[in-house]
Image: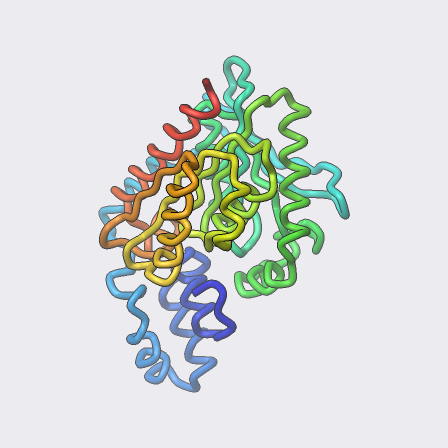
Amino acid sequence: MYESDNPIDQLVHLYIDGAFNRRELIKRVAQKTGSVAAAMSVLAGYEELKGAEPAPEQEQARAALRTPRDAFEIEASDIEFTGPASTLYAHLAKPRMGETKAAVLVVHENRGLVEHIKDVTRRAARGGFLALGVDLLSRQGGVQMFPDAMQQTQAYGRTNQADRRADLLAGFELLKSMGATKIGMTGFCAGGANTWDFAVHVSELAAAVPFYGAPPALEDVERIKAPVFAIYAERDRALTMRLFPVANEMIRLQKTFGMIVYEGVGHAFHNDTGAAYNGPAADDAWTRTLLWFDKFLLN
């Protein structure tokens, strides 16, 4: 759905990703349709919204998994560094005790380096890795230049794959300059697609975990060197169906590959700020992500 040019599709996607609450979604759709009644009728046709309102009992679980900036076991800060075409804005986090030569690049969804992805970056550090989230809106001044979620999405739409890859590669090189000898990557939605793309084009990548991102073209699979663990959702049918031919090709070519499709959940189920969040699936998926990185980055 994130690839759609339909403005209501885009608003629903932003709601699922946690950009705003259901009341704001209805208000914005009503502005497009002309009335609240028409908005409600249109939204009733979106399968991904069924059961998507966050359950109150999940709030405690959401809070428990988050890693604040001042968590005692990590050090985290916003940084700037030189990119190929502009200053790059990023969030850097690392374990407070000891040194690690294993690092993870965390790639955001299609809204820039928002606070949720900074939090995920800190979770990777809490898991024992040097972690970096790069803002792919940096060439336009960074996510801070776009206070509204729709503006952020539009700004991301003005980026292109080659520039995104180049900026992520600059982050990759920064991690190497900090002593990282093995670097993995994980990304969500658009970030999942960028993770697949990086695996195709950067042979040094040591491991990849794309979350519900558009997979590469079949003819590009042969170029992938990194072990890939793909995480997808049953109800995110359009993207998940696109995964299976790529999965078959990975297996045919004897690539190191694993995958899981979580039953009964939809797109963005890992995003604890969004309406599609599913605690058990998100917790299991993150555990599997860290185990994949443990296996291929720490050995």
Taking 206 as reference, is 37 above or below it? below
227 left or right, relative to 42: right
Q: Residue at x 66, y 42 (%)?
A: 89
- Left or right: 120, with 202 as reference point: left
Residue drawn at x 62%, y 49% as measured from the top left: 136
Which corner quadrant holds the C terminus?
Answer: top left
Number of numbered callouts drawn:
0
Whether residue 163 is situated above or below residue 8 in the rendered picture:
above
Quadrant showing the N terminus: bottom left
Q: Position of residue 71 (x, y in %)?
A: 46, 27
Left/right of residue 120 with respect to residue 164 in the rendered view: left
Q: Position of residue 132 (x, y in %)?
A: 57, 34
State the scheme by which the image is colored.
Answer: rainbow
Residue depicted at 50% across the width and 21% down the height: 95
Q: Farthest residue in the bottom direction?
A: 34
Q: Tell me what residue is drawn at x 43 percent, y 61 percent.
A: 20
Which quadrant of the view contains residue 177? Answer: top right
Q: Residue furthest front?
A: 252
Q: Position of residue 193 (x, y in %)?
A: 50, 51
Where residue 258 appears, as percent x and y from the top left, is: 35, 38
Q: Nearer the viewer, residue 251 or 241?
A: 251
290 or 271: which is nearer to us?
A: 290
Question: Where 295 sits versus 115, above or below?
Answer: above
